[in-house]
Every structure is written in C-alpha cells, then in structure tokens.
Amino acid sequence: MEKLIYLDNAATTALRPEAFEAMKPYFMENYSNPNSVYTFAQQSKKAVDEARETIAGLLGAKANEIYFTAGGSESDNWAIKGCAEAFASKGKHIITTKIEHHAVLHTCEYLEKKGCEITYLDVDENGMISVEQLEQAIRPDTILISIMFANNEIGTVEPIREIGAVAKKHGVLFHTDAVQAFGHLPIQVDELNIDLLSASAHKFYGPKGVGFFYMRNSVKLGAYVHGGAQERARRAGTSNVPGIVGMAKAAELAVAQMQESAEKIAVVRDHLIKRVLEEVPYSRLNGHPEQRLPNNANFCFRFIEGESLLIMLDQRGICASSGSACTSGSLDPSHVLLAIGLPHEIAHGSLRLTLSEQTTLEDVDYVADSIKAVVERLRSMSPLYEDFVKSQTE
C-alpha cells in the first residue's frame, strides 16, 4: 500500500517510542516476578511501584488507590459488578446512560438478570446527558452512577464535574469510564468527585492489554480476580511488568503534552470538519460541536452505507471506522447514533475519524477529497438517492 493515513485512534493508538524503550528491559533483562522475595525480583517490584506512583500523581490520587488491570473493559466490569456485590444490602439500583461503551452496557444487562434495576438515561441530540434528569433518577436504593467521561464514538464530553457533585450530594458512588479521556483531557479525581475510574493504556499511546482502575480508598470493593495476593489481594495474577511500565511512561508523556497536543490536533480536526460539511451534501457532524474530544470527527452521510464507505476509503489507504471497534462485526446501526435521535437509515451511513498528533493538514485534505469522491460514487449507485434528487426537482 503506497499511502496509509491512520484515522482510527479511538480504536487504538501507536505505541510511543519512549514507552517501548522503557518496556524493553523488563522482557529479557529484568524479567523477574515482582512478587517474589529474592533480590533480583526487587527491580521489577520497584518498577511497578514507581508506575503506580506516576499514574496516581497524574490523577491527584494515592498510589494505593491504583490497581493494574488488563484494560478498560475489565476495569468497567470491576467497578460495576463490584459495587453491585459490595452494596447489595443497601440497594440494587444503578444509573448509567444509553450511550455507554458496551463494556458498561453489557455488564449492566448482565446485572439486570441478577436482579439489579438499571436506569438508562437519555441524551440530547449532541449526546449530552441532563444533570437534572440524573438527579431526578436517584433513589434511596441507588448504589452507583456510571457515566462515561467522553463518548468513544461521537466524542461528546459529558459534564463530569456536575455529575460528580450530584453524586456526592446524594451519597452515591460515581464511576466514570475514562478510556477515551485519560491522557487527552485534564482529570483530577478529587476535584471532579470521582470515586471509581477506568482507563486503558492503548488509547493514549501505551501498550495493548494493560490498563488501570482507580478506586478511592473509602470504597471497599471485594476481590475481582481470586487467586494470589497481587494488587493488594484484589486482582490476582502475575503482574504484566513491561505493560505497566510502558503504560506509566505513555501516561506521563500524554499528560505533560496534553494541552499543546489538543490544540494542535483540534486545528487539523476543525479543518477536516469544515471541508466535509461544506463540500459533501447531506452530511452532518455527530456529537457536541464544542464539548468534544479534540481528535474526534464523526459524520453521517445520507443515502449510503457506512460499510461500503469504509471499504472504499481503505482502498485509498485511509483507516477509519463506522463506530466502536468493539462492534465492527455488527450490522446493526450504532446504539449511540440511535440514542441521539438519528433514524436507522441515516445512522447506517456513519464514519468516525479520530486523529493523532501525526495527522497533518495535507492528510485530512486527502481524506476530505476521498470522502467527497467516494460518497458521490456510492450515491450514484443508490436508487434512494436518485428518487430523492427527482423529488427535489419536481
């Protein structure tokens, strides 16, 4: 392939060279198990302890509030299932939204079968929840509010500070899936009244297969994986030392460069959005026009199928998606797009483009030109579009 423009950074990111270099010694040189007692193992233990301190510092948390996991999905499961189990005597009511990642939605559906009651909050046409509706949904038996920090498909950033304040006011725990937000948006857990938080390294230029779970010390959830005494006896299994080290280095760099990176990427993103909306008829931007992730541009194009669009863009060397990478095999339209009020026929024509620091204006000009050409070609083969054009001229 002569040209490759990767615009699917919400699915995964490239590993930072600095993170790779930090990881290398722990594969073949310092390969010891950090839970072993001999001196050789202390090198690995020290690396894990330092990584925990680093991530805690970036969140304004304590080191013993950070637990290493296999990624965001595991952390989401731990937060929600853990609360349902730990606070079953208080209540069985959980509040979430209709646009959560499936790691949250499917976990809630599982708990419904176990007797929990779940309130799925609506969102507006931009994907934003109503804090007033959230507060009205709280009941005496509500044990958890789980609302994502930023949406993985349409990029909308939720009013997390206000959500945290409402949760604290009513004495309800607040969990946020920050998989798309951590390393891209400022997060201080105390300022935002966050009790539980999920993150995944490969979304901020770290390695795949490793993440972390923040659990405030006042929250006493039981063990999620039973076995050994790792992660303070709450998550058994030998520590992924290289992954943890690489994640901490990637997190440190992402937060240090966050503002500069966001400003740079947003300029390129806005140029792409402007070109697509102005030059491709019957297109729309999904998600909040301002309160959105700096690298996210999600469009819908009427009278085409998103799958065909993706295939033809791929032939031009453009990597994109029609929504969450976790549901790429599904023929159903995005649950997020349906939740913001789009009809099925429009939701099917979606395209998610997520940029990185390496994405240039030249890249997005090529992408905009390609989208324009591909959409025009697909519409030329659509009887629906032909009928629509005829109806407009009659």
Image (cartoon, helix red, strand yellow):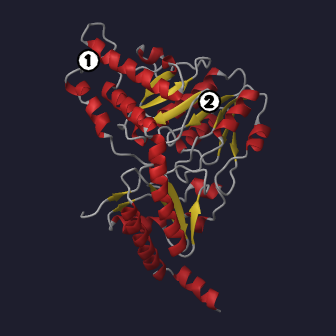
Name which residue lies at 76% across and 43% down.
Answer: 133
Q: Look at the image and tell me whether residue 322 can be seen.
A: no
Of residues 301 and 6, which is closer to you in this image?
Answer: 6
Q: Earlier in the sequence, mark 1 or mark 2?
A: 1
Measured from the top left, where is residue 309 in percent x and y? 43, 68
Measured from the top left, where is residue 300 in percent x and y? 54, 65
Measured from the top left, where is residue 363 in percent x and y? 37, 62
Amino acid bearing label 2: Ile
Residue lying at the far bottom of the rendered structure? 394
Measured from the top left, where is residue 74 in percent x and y? 48, 33
Mark 2 — residue? 194
Amino acid bearing label 1: Ser
Mark 1 — residue? 32
Going by the image, does 374 lie left or right of 100? left
Establish if 284 lies above or below 115: below
Of residues 393 and 115, which is closer to you in this image?
Answer: 393
